[in-house]
C-alpha cells in the first residue's frame, strides 16, 4: 500500500492490484454498450481528462480507457452532452470529502463534485457499483462529470 495525495484528498492505494485488475479488463463499460451516448463518449475519451487527472489516475493505477460506466445526463443548449462516469481503485479514502451526500430522509444521496478545470469535476466515495474488481471491499469509486460534443449519427457509426 502507498499513500497518494490529490488536492484535499489523501488515499491509501494498492496500486499494484489496481493495475493488475485493469490489465485483466478486456472491454470497458462504454465499449460494452451499444447506445449512441457511449459510442460518442468513446470518440472523445482521449481528450476528456485534464492532464492532472491523467497523472492522478496513473498514481492510483487506473486505466482511463477502462471506465466502469458512462451516464448521459442531458444535452446542453450549446449542443454538448453532459456526461459522467466512474472508475475504481483498491484502497481507502483517508482524508477529504466524500462526494456522496446522504439525503436527510434516508432515501438516496446527492453527489457533490469538485471542479478541476472549467468543464471537468471529480469526486471520491467508498463504493463498488459495477466494479471490475473481484473483491469488492476497500474500493474507492472515482466519479467524474464533464461535457463533450454531440456527434451526428453518421460519425458515431463510422
Image (tube, rainbow, N blue to C red):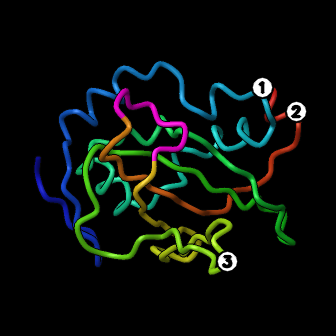
Residue 101: quadrant of the picture? bottom right
Q: Which residue is mark 2?
A: 154
Q: Which residue is mark 1?
A: 158
Residue furthest out toward the left: 2
Q: Earlier in the sequence, mark 2 or mark 3?
A: 3
Estimate the x, y position of residue 68 in percent, counting from the top left: 53, 38
Q: Residue at left 66%, top 44%?
A: 41
Q: Residue at left 77%, top 62%?
A: 80
Q: Which residue is mark 3?
A: 105
Quadrant that contains the C terminus: top right
Q: Residues within 10 Å of mark 2 (few under 14, many from 20)?
A: few
Q: Earlier in the sequence, mark 3 or mark 1?
A: 3
As measured in the structure, the alpha-carbon distance from the residue carrying label 3 to the one carrying label 1 is 47 Å
Q: Which residues are magenta?
A: 128-135
Q: Residue at left 47%, top 76%?
A: 114
Helix, strand or loop status at disc 2: helix
Estimate the x, y position of residue 4 in percent, counting from the top left: 18, 60
Residue placed most toward the observer, 152 or 35: 35
In the drawing, does residue 10 fall left or right of residue 141?
left
Helix, strand or loop status at disc 1: loop
Q: Is residue 140 magenta?
A: no
Amino acid at each position: 500500500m502507498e499513500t497518494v495525495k490529490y488536492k484535499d484528498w489523501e488515499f491509501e492505494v494498492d496500486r499494484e492490484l489496481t493495475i493488475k485488475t485493469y490489465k485483466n479488463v478486456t472491454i470497458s463499460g462504454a465499449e460494452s454498450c451499444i447506445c449512441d451516448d457511449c459510442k460518442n463518449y468513446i470518440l472523445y475519451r482521449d481528450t476528456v481528462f485534464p492532464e492532472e487527472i491523467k497523472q492522478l489516475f496513473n498514481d492510483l493505477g487506473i486505466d482511463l480507457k477502462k471506465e466502469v460506466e458512462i451516464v448521459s445526463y442531458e444535452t446542453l443548449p450549446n449542443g454538448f452532452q453532459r456526461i459522467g462516469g466512474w472508475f475504481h481503485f483498491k484502497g481507502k479514502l483517508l482524508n477529504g470529502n466524500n462526494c456522496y451526500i446522504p439525503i436527510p430522509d434516508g432515501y438516496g444521496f446527492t453527489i457533490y463534485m469538485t471542479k478541476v478545470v472549467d468543464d471537468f469535476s471529480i469526486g471520491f466515495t467508498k463504493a463498488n457499483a459495477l466494479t471490475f474488481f473481484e473483491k469488492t471491499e476497500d474500493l474507492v469509486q472515482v466519479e467524474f462529470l464533464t461535457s463533450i460534443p454531440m456527434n451526428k449519427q453518421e460519425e458515431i457509426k463510422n
